[in-house]
Amino acid sequence: MFGSSHDVTLQSTVTEDAKIVWRVFHDSVTLITIAQNDDADDCHYNNLLNLVFNAMVLLVGIEEVSNIKNVEKFKKEIKVCYNLVDRILGIKGSWGFSQLTNTVETIAAPENAVLQNFLDAFTEAAESTFGCLFIDGKIAVATKKWWSLSANELVLLSLLLSSLTSCTSRDIPIYLPDNHPTVPHRLMTFQLTRGIEVCVICGPSPSLTDLEPEILRFWKPSYDSLRSVLKLSSRNFPTNLSLDHNTLGFLLINKETNCCLCSINPTFNGGHPDETLSFSQRREVLRSFYKRMVGTFFSSVVPDSDSGPSEFSHQAMESYITTETHKCYALMSGSHQLFVVYGEGIPTYAMRSITQKTFALLTKDRNISV
């Protein structure tokens, strides 16, 4: 308030051990985040605030959020957003990579090509062009129209589904924050089996009761393929691809398609000689490494991540760090970025060539469309 009265915009501040970032949306809502100061660029916290605001737009519409006439009424209306906001903040469920990278997590499986045909047929029967198949919270396949949604919309829809209590079917009113923030749509979801849901975005018709009987007819023949992909969900990419045994985890991002592929169990077939990091620790290391690189050395689809320190006169394409328990390497090539966590035993000089080989494997495989 003091700064604004003097025509100064103050966007963040730090204390001894915390960082406070705030942002005003549409001169209506002020969002503030307080987090442990990890020296990450402000772009990550601004992205978080942007997702929280758009979560409200997704479920109540921009008009209700930007023109608040009755504060008490507004407080009641946005209660529907609480589960989604908790998911964004990592309070409900484990921290994923979607809300951090502003890209949607995918699962790459050989069966995806077959499942695409089932999805296209079902989406057409639902009188829609927006269809998606979620397996264990990640997109297996989606229609072209679904992929045409903005990065915000793709991420929020996937987080919304993972924040909801499991049930056989749903009919949820939604708004598309970037494409149609004032026009209500219907998100219909159907559970095919545990951990697998198919979703369509529709207008006023058809009804949920009209579509429910069609589920068995359209999806029963795909049951074996669905189960095969579900078994892959801890790895997320085809078992025929063999990565270096020192690899503890990786995060592959495509800035153009707004997709990412992550695995913290990439070598489960051959075992791993270095078990100093648990799966949850590998995930946290990947998250921390990404936050350290993006906004400092790399840019991404995260808003305002392209500034970087003024002392750098060139664009960094690769970077690495070493610690007592692990080593990390980052590589950028075209629209792709690859972040890899290795065990401490890998020679530092070997990380570059192994990362480049890993990148080639992941980007050239026909089953991986990230």
Image: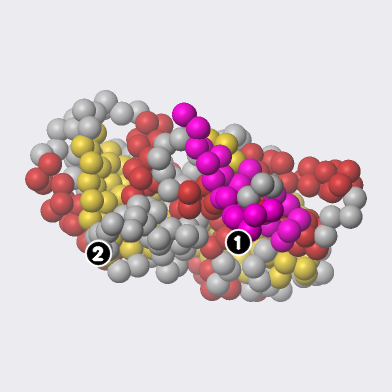
| Label number found at residue 294 | none
| Label number found at residue 314 | 2
Badge 1 crowding class, 10 Å Cα cut-off, few under 14, some 14 to 19, many 20 or more, is: many
Q: Amino acid at mark 2?
A: His
Q: From the viewer's perspective, is residue 130 above or below residue 197?
A: below
Which residue occupies 27% across, 26% down? 276
**Res 24 visible:** yes
Query: Do residues under tags 1 and 2 come within 8 Å of each other at their CB atoms?
Result: no
* Element at label 2: loop
**Res 188 visible:** no
- Residue 81 lies left or right of residue 353; in this view the side is right
Q: Position of residue 123 (x, y in %)?
A: 64, 69
Q: Position of residue 143 (x, y in %)?
A: 55, 70
Q: Amino acid at mark 1?
A: Glu
Which residue occupies 39% across, 54% down? 295
| Label number found at residue 153 | 1
Magenta run includes residue 109: no
Which is nearer the N-term, disc 1 or disc 2? 1
* Element at label 1: helix
- In this rendering, which labeled residue sits more in front, label 1 or label 2? 2
Magenta extent: 5-32
Farthest residue in the front direction?
Answer: 6
